[in-house]
Image (tube, grey):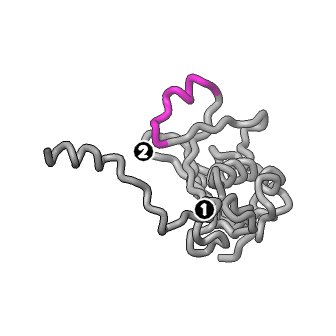
Amino acid sequence: MQKVKLPISVDPVRAAQKHLELDARIPKALLSRLAESTISIQSDIDTVFSFEVDQQKLRIFHGKASVAVELLCQRCNEPMIYQCDAEFTYCPVHNQEQENKLPDAYEPIYYDENGEVNLHQVVEDELILTLPQIAKHAIEDCKINDFELTFGEIDEEEQRPNPFDALAQLKRK
């Protein structure tokens, strides 16, 4: 199946009734908040959405999004590539009462004034949530290998007296 551009918003009720499945791409230029959170976005964002009606007659949609982004390693201050993979399940709601009745397995999302859900915003939010709090290379890939956190050199030949020698002498007596 060929990837197409993901529509900005969709009516989740109609999409669920049709059992709509979307395998689409979002151009990276449209996700400005993700771009601000990273050094750069490496490619367009691959997404998969499936809309359905569950056993409780709730309209839900599952989604996956994937993209590689460039972050700054906080250990060595060098750029690194990080793969963001997000999976999510939402149930559109109109008000707080509907939200309170939702099963815990579903995350609520509110309709806009047209009864639609902004899919680009959902994908961008989920990808931002997958970013690490502290970006670091794997230890073997990081430029700082030995964690050079000590300053100066310790003289190995200098022997300090053991503070427990006095107790050892008392024990012998």
Q: How far from the left and from the top, in percent, is residue 96? A: 60, 24
Measured in 3D between alpha carbons, the distance from the residue under mark 2 to the one under mark 1, in whole angstroms, is 28 Å
The residue positioned 57% from the left and 41% from the top of the image is 91
- Is-magenta flag for residue 137? no
User: Which quadrant of the structure image shows residue 167?
Assistant: top left
Along the line of sight, the residue nearer the viewer: 98 or 167: 167
The residue positioned 56% from the left and 51% from the top of the image is 88
Q: Which residues are magenta?
A: 95-105
Q: Alpha-carbon neighbours of circle 1 within 10 Å: few (<14), some, or many (≥20)?
A: some
Residue linked to disc 2: 55
In the picture, measured across the screen, residue 172 lies left or right of residue 114, that is left
Q: Is residue 88 visible?
A: yes
Along the line of sight, the residue nearer the viewer: 77 or 16: 77
The residue positioned 74% from the left and 62% from the top of the image is 72
| Pointer 2 with pointer 1, Cβ within 8 A | no
Q: Is residue 19 visible?
A: no
User: Which quadrant of the structure image shows residue 144?
Assistant: bottom right
Residue 35 marker: none
Residue linked to disc 1: 85
Q: Amino acid at mark 1?
A: Asp
Q: Alpha-carbon neighbours of circle 2 within 10 Å: few (<14), some, or many (≥20)?
A: few
Compared to residue 82, the image places residue 118 above or below, namely: above
Q: How far from the left and from the top, in percent, is residue 75? A: 66, 61
Along the line of sight, the residue nearer the viewer: 53 or 144: 144
- Is-magenta flag for residue 100? yes
Compared to residue 42, the image places residue 108 above or below, namely: above
Q: How far from the left and from the top, in percent, is residue 169? A: 22, 47
In the picture, measured across the screen, residue 77 lies left or right of residue 16, that is right
User: Which quadrant of the structure image shows residue 64?
Assistant: bottom right
Q: Amino acid at mark 2?
A: Gln
Judge depth for marks 2 and 1 and give the one in front: 1
In the picture, measured across the screen, residue 44 lies left or right of residue 149, that is right
